[in-house]
Image: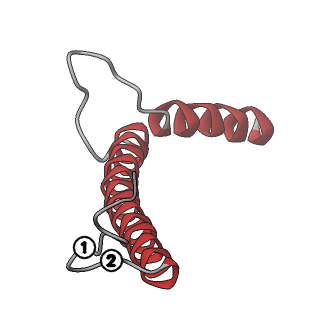
Amino acid sequence: MAHRMNELKPEHCYTKEEVDKLIEKAIDDAIRKHNRNAATISMILGIIFLALFAEGFFRVMGMIPPFLGIDASVIQDIVDRVKEEVLRTLS
């Protein structure tokens, strides 16, 4: 039995080139979004680590008071040792 319709024609059919462009645009958008999110996360982590490093450095230098009774200051120890060494050398 012969078909009554020779060919079904949808209203709009995507060509291979149009499909490739749509896929390329979707991939580009996904990569752009990933890079933006990764950069934002990296900036936030960088600021946090820099702040924690600076806080620890200033605490060791004695510029920030001890936290929870833990004295990490090394400056006074160095001053005492140098003073002892100088006095021992001068005597």
Residue 10, numbered label: 1
Name the residue nearer the viewer: 67 or 79. 67
From this view, report whether residue 67 is shown above or below residue 23: above
* For residue 53, above or below residue 91: below
**Residue that badge 2 annotates:** 13
Instruction: Examine the rendered structure and indicate whether residue 14 appears above or below residue 84.
Output: below
Please give the name of the residue rendered at 45% of the width and 35% of the height, measured from the top-left corner.
76
Residue 23 at what x, y percent from top left?
A: 44, 70
Looking at numbered disc 1 in the image, what kind of residue is underneath it?
Answer: Pro
In the image, is 4 to the left or to the right of 46?
left
User: Which residue is pictured at 41% across the width and 26% down the height?
Assistant: 72
Amino acid at the residue labelled 2 = Cys
Side (left or right) of 67 relative to 78: left
Residue at image point 35% right, 59% down: 3
Q: Position of residue 80 (x, y in %)?
A: 54, 32
* Residue nearest the observer in this picture, 79 or 3: 3
User: Marks 2 and 1: in contact by CB < 8 Å?
Assistant: yes
Q: Residue furthest top?
A: 69
